[in-house]
Image (cartoon, rainbow, N blue to C red):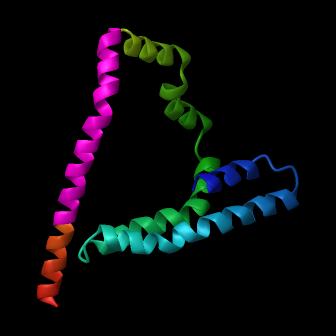
Amino acid sequence: MAVVLLFIMAKAPAADYGSSITFRFLCTVFAASPMAVAGGTISDIWTPMQLHFGLTVDTFAAYESPFLGPVISSSAPHWVFVLLAQSETFGPGLLEWGAKDLSGSLGTRLLTNVYRPFTMIFVAMALISYIYHLTKEAAAKAAAAG
């Protein structure tokens, strides 16, 4: 999907119609397989009772975004986007966040950087085993019901 994003960004400043169509075609080619397997991924994530919600959200996001994006961006005032992006790109705010991060002692930051990967591994292992348990339980219920 990162390649699709690159082609979308390359299409925006396209100088002529031919390059615009070429980049749009490349976006379609590289986005086809993720969109083709999205339904299977959604059906793996949600139970059959929740599947209608997942597929609705997925298909709406995938197929209506190219239509709704230009409509919303052409009708919304420019200042809305400026306000939404202001907190992440405002220079003094970024400097303040950086100063907060660097205000701790070096030992504390090093210790955090050392133990954080191990914490993530153990949390991920716990999540994986819990998801496996739920999947196994749901498969047993489905086998008993049908």
Give me the residue at 81% from left, 50% from top.
14
- Secondary structure, magenta segment, majority class: helix
Is 54 drawn above or below residue 1 in the view shown?
below
Is 69 drawn above or below residue 121 in the view shown?
below
Give me the residue at 16% from left, 86% from top.
143
Task: State left or right for residue 116 relative to residue 69.
Answer: left
Give me the residue at 48% from left, 62% from top.
61
Is 91 drawn above or below residue 120 in the view shown?
above
The x, y position of residue 18, in whole percent, is: 87, 61
Occupied quadrant, residue 103: top left
Which image quarter is the N terminus in? bottom right
Q: Does any portion of residue 117 appear in the rendered image?
A: yes
The x, y position of residue 84, in whole percent, is: 50, 34
Q: Nearer the viewer, residue 27 or 105?
A: 105
Queried whether the magenta region covers residue 74, the answer comes back as: no
Task: State left or right for residue 91 relative to residue 132.
Answer: right
Queried whether the magenta region covers residue 105, the answer comes back as: yes
Q: Nearer the viewer, residue 45 or 52?
A: 45
Q: Nearer the viewer, residue 133 or 27?
A: 133
* Range of magenta residues: 104-133
